[in-house]
Image: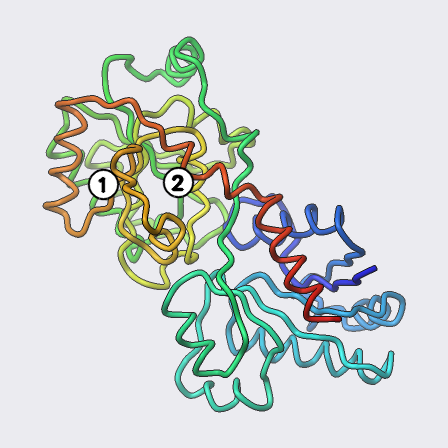
Amino acid sequence: MLRILLLGDFTGEPTEGQRNISQTYFMKLRELCDVVRVNIKDLVCNQSLVIRKIKAYEPDVILYPAGPTPYSYIGLKYLQLMTSIINRYRSKLVTVATHPYIPKYFVPLGRTIFRVDYGFWQSLHIYKLFKLLRIPSEFLPNGVDIKRFCPGSSKEKEYLREKWGLPKDKVVVLHVGPLRRNRGIHLLCALKRMFSNEIIIIVIASTKSPFEIDMYNFLKNCGCLIIHSYIHEIESIYRLADVYIFPTMRRGAAIDIPLSVLEALSSNLIVITYPYGGLPLMFKGVRVEEYGMFYFSSLRNLIKIMARIIKNPIEPKTRDLVLPYTWDNVIYQLYNSISNLTR
């Protein structure tokens, strides 16, 4: 049976994208093969534990489903070196580029000393980078738990809005993510000012990512409702909303396929998003507007889309867009490709 050493962040609650992905990979992969997890911090803080796991487990593949960055490539090579010394064979190195940062100076090293055996990409930018690094690769999206993130009934929506003290007659707009300037959340304030009488904007702020107090005050002062605490049943917040907005336009400010967008689609919300990262690749050839998903290109365009939704309410069918992208399907694709690599 295939043996995988999974390198990632497995500490605390899965409130942040890459931590969520690492923990989901572990839970799903262990249904298909033998898998042992190693916290990336242990490469520095607890090397003896890492060495014991390598010796006892003898992994065929070392998999890192976050980043990658120069530091993670160094960590992967360190683990490969340890398996070569301890177990006297070379484990394959595989990376999933969910939130990559590879500066130009690292490209020659990525082709040679720190080269990995296989890569999975989530945006055309990283596809081109893997070609430059001469790494064989394929597209692998993120997945979504369609059982957890599912539409609620009208009665449930009414109950949840009453529970959170929200009006029943306004359009509830939701965003989930860190309070950082580069995430484009200033666009939410522009919407709130433009449609102050028609919409309520809720921002679920990440409790683990860096917090910018000036952005918190900015959102609060323009009338947004900010919840800066961990919500265990985050799916209930999606169920009380009507519209989900992902305003990030800057490449690298978020993971290449944002989990919150997939969760909103699975919850059958109207979704307005910048054509960020790999989202257009996931729905290539699909007229997403017919389902209730809209791409914006500027603030002016965003306002126009929101005005149309307010004036002419639609019945979304966005859940249909993500039904092929369950975590089970995504991890099975990953498993098959890695299995072929080790044959």
Please provide percent x and percent y for residue 328: 62, 43
Q: Quadrant of residue 201?
A: top left
The quarter in which the C terminus is drawn is: bottom right
User: How many numbered discs sit on the rendered protein?
Assistant: 2
Rate crowding at label 1 as few (under 14), some (14 to 19) or many (20 or more) other CA atoms within 10 Å: many
Tell me residue 19's x, y (percent).
Answer: 57, 52
Label 2, label 1: how many angstroms apart (C-alpha)? 12 Å
Q: Which residue bears the numbered disc 2?
A: 176
Query: Which labelled disc corresponds to residue 188?
Result: 1
Can you give x and y, in whole percent of width and height, for residue 8 in the image? 64, 60
- Residue 241 lies, with reference to residue 194, above or below; the image says above
Which element is circle 1 on?
helix
Q: Residue furthest right?
A: 56
Q: Residue at x 57, y 29 (%)?
A: 147
Judged from this view, the residue extending furthest toward the top is 155
- Place residue 219 in its image quadrant: top left
